[in-house]
Image: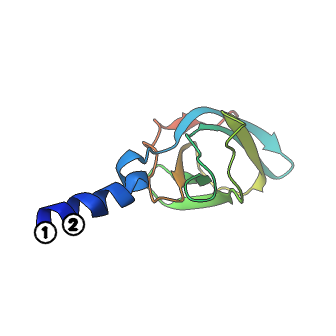
């Protein structure tokens, strides 16, 4: 009986088995007043409130989180989608950043290669 229970329990948790991390398909960076505007395009198989891309963040090259953009709802019928974050203030001397996205199931995208800031 124990193997059957384990099998049934696994069948009740399909979202964990099929979870996929979000994938960043584009990043646009531009000057925005005294700061920067980041527009990030994400593709993720959102299924609804139970599993959706729920944010992205900008990282310094050493891995420090410099800014975070929460996403407050699923984008089931809008894939890929782009969301922006304005007036991002970066530490003096920052020349490159990385961007990563995450989802409500705890999956994190691969961290992209460093992106040069447009000066």
Q: Is residue 76 left or right of residue 12?
A: right
Residue sitting farthest toward the right? 33
The location of residue 103, given as percent across then percent down, is 53, 54
Query: Relative to 48, does residue 1 appear above or below in the rendering?
Result: below
The location of residue 102, given as percent across then percent down, is 52, 53
Asked whether the viewer can see residue 41, the reply is: yes
Depth order, front residue of 97/91: 97
Asked whether the viewer can see residue 37, the reply is: no
Which image quarter holds the N terminus? bottom left
Q: Tell me whether circle 2 and circle 1 mark residues in contact (CB < 8 Å).
A: yes
Q: Looking at the rendered structure, which numbered label has been put on residue 2?
A: 1
Tell me the quarter of the picture where residue 29 sits. Answer: top right
The location of residue 28, given as percent across then percent down, is 69, 34
Depth order, front residue of 30/3: 3
Depth order, front residue of 107/24: 107
Residue at numbered disc 2: 5
Distance from the alpha carbon under mark 2 to that under mark 1:
5 Å
Q: Residue at x 55, y 54 (%)?
A: 51
Label 2 Cα neighbours within 10 Å, binned few <14 / some 14-19 / many ≥20: few
Instruction: Give the structural element (helix, strand or loop) at label 2.
Output: helix
The location of residue 84, given as percent across then percent down, is 76, 46
């Amino acid at each position: 009986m124990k193997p059957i229970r384990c099998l049934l329990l696994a069948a009740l948790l399909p979202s964990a088995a099929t979870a996929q991390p979000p994938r960043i398909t584009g990043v646009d960076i531009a000057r925005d007043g005294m700061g920067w505007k980041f527009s990030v395009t994400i593709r993720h198989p959102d299924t609804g409130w139970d599993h959706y891309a729920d944010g992205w963040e900008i990282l310094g090259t050493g891995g420090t989180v410099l800014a975070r953009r929460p996403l407050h709802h699923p984008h089931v019928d809008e894939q890929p989608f782009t969301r922006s974050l304005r007036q991002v203030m970066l530490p003096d001397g920052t020349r490159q950043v990385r961007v990563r996205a995450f989802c409500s199931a705890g999956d994190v995208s691969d961290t992209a290669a460093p992106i040069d800031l447009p000066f």
